[in-house]
């Protein structure tokens, strides 16, 4: 749904809600895709959300919609539902979505729900809840098609017709041995191409990519993306097949990881969600600003230490913003290139020396160009050689150091397994600010002979 | 391939290259996945790349590898190949990959290659080259399975066995009318579940998502992601089916768009690639620093205008970094949240007023907190009430204005269809720097009674 269509739909639903035209609303909600409804839900009040939800006739449609809602909306919405109502809808949802929802509820409520669910489902959900959110186990779907290697292509097709109706990704058939250990894979495509009596073991691929339940979700996503596969099987410690991660979840992982990286780099905190609460946003953003406050106060004391220089040459103050700005900006460039390069696999930790040296060189070249430019402006304004040279040198050193620090810090963080994106935000910028200001006043004090 | 495994592989290949152990190398390159080889290629010299390439026995393997190489590496590599060699490999590659490669070559060379290719392929490639790179037409695969609606499920399966062997995504079968217009879709799954004699029109889904050739690739990707489909059909103006966009390309689009957004926000320029050339990097990054240089010079003149105030109260200079830093950081927070919110669809242009008001409120609250904190430090150090109050007020106004500008500018850019990510980088930061410095000196001059 493009945003124009979405807007038209939202407007008509709002209008119908105001008018109370229940029959029109019922028609619309029942023929609109759950993914589109979920967007509309976000813009409605809770009571209107409930009204629309109650108009949905098909329980499966209700389940899909609940699975599509974003965290904030779904949590709020579920809080208002009775236990019976929740259980009824959860029963028809894929168990990985159920686990996601239960994982966000208070322990008590989630236990009460699990108790009321059918045993088979609740056991599966509890199994999923035992894995970390960000691992292969936490994102996998426990529904897949697993057959023994002696099954023939024709029998496999028959089993598709009778069972596995609710398998999300029925395009791969996994082959397991007597201990449920993964030994091969066949695509649905191969199944229809070979003679019906051919056993799976004769045409299955034995070189299967698989991941362990504990693998980080980002690694899992990279494997699926690199090999252009539609799903990757997840195995436990004993190579027993326990689930699959499908490509649509991989898309979500990449988008989520990119968002987290961007927010971390901007110093907003990775847990930020588009909440409607001003106080919650304020609370999340507050600590990230502290680094820059602290750095600013250090810069304040540094400049205070050069009070004599400033008394003699007041105009020194006027160059503080441009020197800090140039250093800050090239530092952000360098750290962003490094962080994103590491995230996409274009840069490797093993290339530390090479990457940092290259950045330093670029910082130096750009520093010389902009240093001359800004020094010239200084000279035109004040006609003091020593001042112009001080400003030029300050820009050069600030930009070189910024490129160095901006590339070195995330590389080192990656090396010691700290998320490099965290390094990039306010911390690097603040460090660069302090260094820039100090170099500038030190150089000027010497050259101006204060 | 995880990075550890990748490193081991790279090291052994480098060692074997030094020793010239051709037979070992041949064994390794022929059993390593093309996606893994492409990563290794990036770390090798051109002559070693060529050596490894010549050892690959299967021409299809060569083709896949060429398709997997990143822009820089592939361009360099192809420049060194003879026309015959290029054509031989391109003939076995999917035509969308061929079009990508030819689109990056000089016109002459690409024409010469097209001339030597088989007519059917070259016509298809030329067709693809006529679409914009960033549209559905530019990224689609022209290979798909299209059948008429009277074909039975059994006949459809037979046609899968005989033709369409090289279709990338054989999980959907599209149904077209006599004019090749898209009328329905069936999954391979449905095909094996129904009775063989059932005609497609009886079980196909007629409510097909499709996109126009001219649709922006990001929109296409969003549709595939939202509806969790594996491929979306692409139609021309007359609804004729001309290609499909597959989910693996969608992953690449999201990753690429996220990278572009991140780089734009950091002021590096969207075309940035991890090039090995220092001069090229410098050239790309140079213009983006100009905004901050220009802004710094304006700030310089603003501060110069308050020389009298500075002469009287030198210590005013010491607060410039903290005031600029706080404004800059909260501005980056606000603009990043807005840009990413717009990109992921969590925020909409229609909510402009609400979003900007919320950011302003957060800026004001955080401004008051940090204003009091920094004002207290000022008071402890200098014991001048008017100074402490000036600094506090400057922080409050700087942070409020920064949150306002940081959220308003990208929202307005999005409204007038300019990419909001461009607005977020150095431009917003620079504007905030100038405003912060001006407010600070204006407030201090008044309150200190200069």
Image (cartoon, coloured by chain):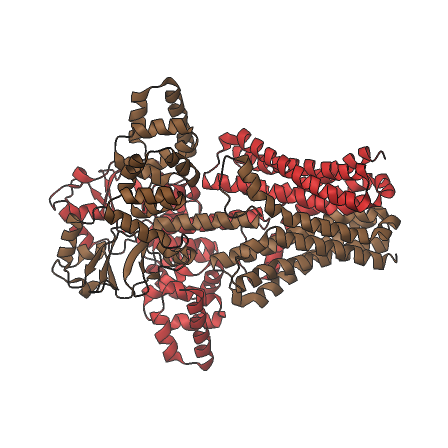
Chain colours: A red, B brown
Is any atom of residue A136 visible in this view? no
Residue A237's spot in the image, x, y percent? 35, 36
Residue B360's spot in the image, x, y percent? 65, 62
Residue in the image at 87% along x and 43% along y: A311
Relative vertical location of residue A362 with respect to residue B300 in this rendering, above or below: above
Which residue occupies the foreground of this view, A396 or B338?
A: A396
Which residue occupies the foreground of this view, A117 or A320?
A: A320
Count the labels in the image.
0
The C terminus of chain B, quarter of image: bottom right
Residue A186's spot in the image, x, y percent? 23, 43
Which residue occupies the foreground of this view, A369 or B144?
A: A369
Quadrant in the picture for residue A397? top right
Residue A374's spot in the image, x, y percent? 71, 43
In the picture as drawn, the residue positioned furthest to the top comes out as B19
Q: With A314 as the anchor, is B223 left or right in this view? A: left
Which residue occupies the foreground of this view, A113 or B283?
A: B283
The N terminus of chain B, quarter of image: top left
Residue in the image at 31% along x and 21% along y: B22
Quadrant in the picture for residue A390? top right
Residue in the image at 51% along x and 42% along y: A340
Q: With B258 as the anchor, is B55 left or right in this view? A: left
Is any atom of residue A435 visible in this view? yes
Relative vertical location of residue B338 with respect to residue A386 in this rendering, above or below: below
């Amino acid at each position: 749904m493009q945003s124009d269509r979405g807007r038209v739909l939202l407007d008509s639903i709002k209008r119908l809600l105001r008018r109370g035209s229940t029959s029109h609303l019922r028609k619309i909600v029942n023929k609109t895709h759950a993914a589109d409804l979920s967007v509309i839900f976000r813009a409605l009040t809770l009571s209107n959300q409930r009204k629309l939800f109650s108009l949905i006739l098909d329980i499966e449609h209700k389940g899909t919609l609940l699975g599509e809602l974003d965290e904030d909306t779904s949590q709020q919405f579920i809080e208002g539902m009775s236990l019976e109502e929740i259980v009824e809808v959860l029963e028809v949802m894929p168990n990985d979505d159920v686990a996601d929802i239960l994982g966000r509820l208070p322990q008590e409520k989630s236990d009460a729900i699990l108790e009321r669910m059918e045993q088979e489902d609740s056991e599966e959900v509890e199994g999923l809840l035992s894995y970390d959110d960000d691992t292969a186990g936490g994102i996998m779907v426990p529904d897949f098609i697993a057959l023994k290697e002696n099954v023939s292509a024709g029998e496999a097709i028959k089993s598709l017709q009778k069972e596995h109706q609710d398998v999300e990704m029925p395009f791969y058939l996994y082959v397991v041995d007597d201990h449920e250990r993964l030994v091969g894979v066949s695509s649905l495509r191969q199944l229809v191409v070979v003679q019906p009596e051919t056993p799976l073991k004769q045409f299955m691929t034995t070189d299967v990519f698989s991941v362990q339940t504990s693998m980080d979700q980002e690694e899992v996503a990279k494997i699926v993306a690199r090999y252009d596969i539609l799903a990757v099987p997840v195995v436990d410690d004993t190579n027993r097949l326990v689930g699959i991660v499908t490509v649509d979840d991989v898309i979500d992982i990449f988008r989520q990881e990119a968002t987290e990286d961007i927010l971390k780099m901007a110093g907003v905190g990775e847990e930020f969600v588009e909440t409607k609460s001003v106080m919650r946003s304020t609370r999340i953003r507050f600590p990230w600003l502290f680094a820059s406050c602290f750095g600013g106060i250090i810069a304040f004391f540094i400049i205070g230490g050069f009070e004599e220089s400033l008394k003699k040459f007041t105009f020194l103050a006027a160059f503080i913003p441009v020197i800090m700005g140039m250093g800050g900006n090239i530092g952000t460039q360098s750290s962003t290139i490094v962080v994103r390069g590491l995230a996409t696999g274009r840069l490797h930790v093993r290339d530390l020396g090479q990457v940092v040296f290259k950045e330093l060189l670029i910082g130096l070249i750009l520093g010389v160009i902009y240093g001359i430019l800004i020094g010239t402006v200084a000279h035109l304004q004040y006609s003091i050689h020593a001042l112009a040279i001080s400003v030029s040198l300050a820009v050069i050193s600030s930009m070189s150091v910024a490129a160095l620090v901006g590339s070195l810090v995330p590389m080192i963080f990656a090396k010691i397994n700290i998320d490099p994106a965290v390094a990039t935000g306010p911390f690097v910028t603040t460090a660069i600010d302090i260094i820039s200001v100090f170099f500038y006043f030190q150089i000027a004090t010497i050259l101006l002979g204060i």
